Every structure is written in C-alpha cells, then in structure tokens.
Image (cartoon, rainbow, N blue to C red):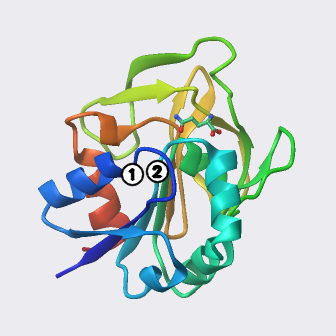
Amino acid sequence: GDRVGVLALQGDFREHVQILQRLGVEPVEVRRPEELEDLAGLIIPGGESTTIGKLMLENGLLDAVRSYYYRNGKVWGTCAGMVLLASATTGPPQPLIALMNALVERNGFGRQVHSFERELDVKGFDEPFPGVFIRAPFFEEVGPGVEVLSEVQGRIVAAAGERVLATAFHPELTDDTRFHEYFLQEVCGI
Ligand code: GLN
C-alpha cells in the first residue's frame, strides 16, 4: 500500500496521521532522515515553525527533506509547515526548507486576531472549504511557478507549486477531508 509521511518533531502531526488512516493510506511518523524512504508524500504540520525548523536542522532533516523533494517527492505544509516551505520570510531569519518561490509573513493574521474560521473559496473545489486559522501565516508574494489556490482579504492562504502544496489553515482540525484527498490524489498521484 501507499505510505505517506507526517513530520512528527513538534506540532499537530497526530491529527494528520488520523486523517490519513481514515483515508486508507499508511501514515509514517517521520523523525529521522531514513524514515523518508519510499514515501508517496510528506506532510509538514502546524505548530511552531521556528521550533520545527531548529529540530529539523539538528536532526539532519532540513537537507533530507530537500533531497526527498528533489528526488520527485511530494510535500504539503499546513500553517507552520507553510512557513517552512517558503523561500523567504518577512521576519527574523529562521531555518526554512524553502521549496516554494514565495515570501511568507509568519504571523500574518496573528497580530490582528489570534484565530478565526472562514469559509474559503478554493480553486478546483466545488464547495467552500472550512478554513481554521490559528496564528496563521500568509504568502505576501509568490513568484513564477507558484499558483494561488485561495485568498482571504487579498492575502494568499493556499498555493501550489510543482509537487508542493501550502495551506495557512488547518484542514486536519476539521472533519472535511477534501484537502487531504486533494494532496493524495492530485499531488501524490495515489
Ligand atoms: N505562525 C506560527 C509559526 O510561524 C504557525 C502557527 C500554527 O502552525 N498554528 O510558527
């Protein structure tokens, strides 16, 4: 069967694991570079992007995830995961995986309002998706090769690049599995 990894260093990885199980794929909790082998896809969860980035660096996973990606791997980041996928941040320097040509505002929505929910229009989805935002980032700019999938107040909250997906919100904290199915089917090709 297909195995899909969830980076399990910090953050809400368990919720992603549970949804993957519900969708019938085998979840793999990734804490070491070897655990990236033969994965059909990899999810970087929400949490604290600075903490996750430092732990990735210490565990050799920053380079390992880049190698995984450049060897045809598929990656999806939610919230802190979206921050880590950006190539640059507007804030202080922090370790980034940097797989997407995008500038991220790390606590973009956080300064105004800690968390909120919003029905989102998402490109390719027939019905709105329930967006759960918690100290959420947004992409301030995306470069060539990155397609905007959803925006809130002109801010980019979902985007896709080549084999890579980013969402500022948390589909794993809802009962709606469409984003996970989208990643598995459209990005991973499962
Ligand atoms: N803004 C947070 C960060 O950059 C992410 C918050 C979250 O994942 N819920 O780490």
Tell me whether the residue at label 2 lies in contact with that at label 1, contact meaning CB atoms closer than 8 angstroms. Answer: yes
The residue where tag 2 is placed is 45
Q: Quadrant of ligand 1?
A: top right
The residue where tag 1 is placed is 13
Q: Where's residue 117, x and y in %?
A: 40, 19
Residue under the image location 63 percent in, 35 percent down: 138
Q: What's the amino acid at mark 1?
A: Phe
Q: What's the amino acid at mark 2?
A: Pro
Callout 2: CB less than 8 Å from ligand 1: yes
Q: Where's residue 185, x and y in %?
A: 27, 66
Q: Where's residue 9, x and y in %?
A: 51, 58
Report whether 51 appears left or right of 127: right
Report whether 113 appears left or right of 63: left
Q: CA–CA distance between discs 2 and 1?
A: 5 Å
In the image, 96 versus 30, the foreground residue is: 30
Q: Where's residue 68, x and y in %?
A: 54, 81
Residue under the image location 34 percent in, 47 percent down: 124
Q: Secondary structure at mark 2?
A: loop
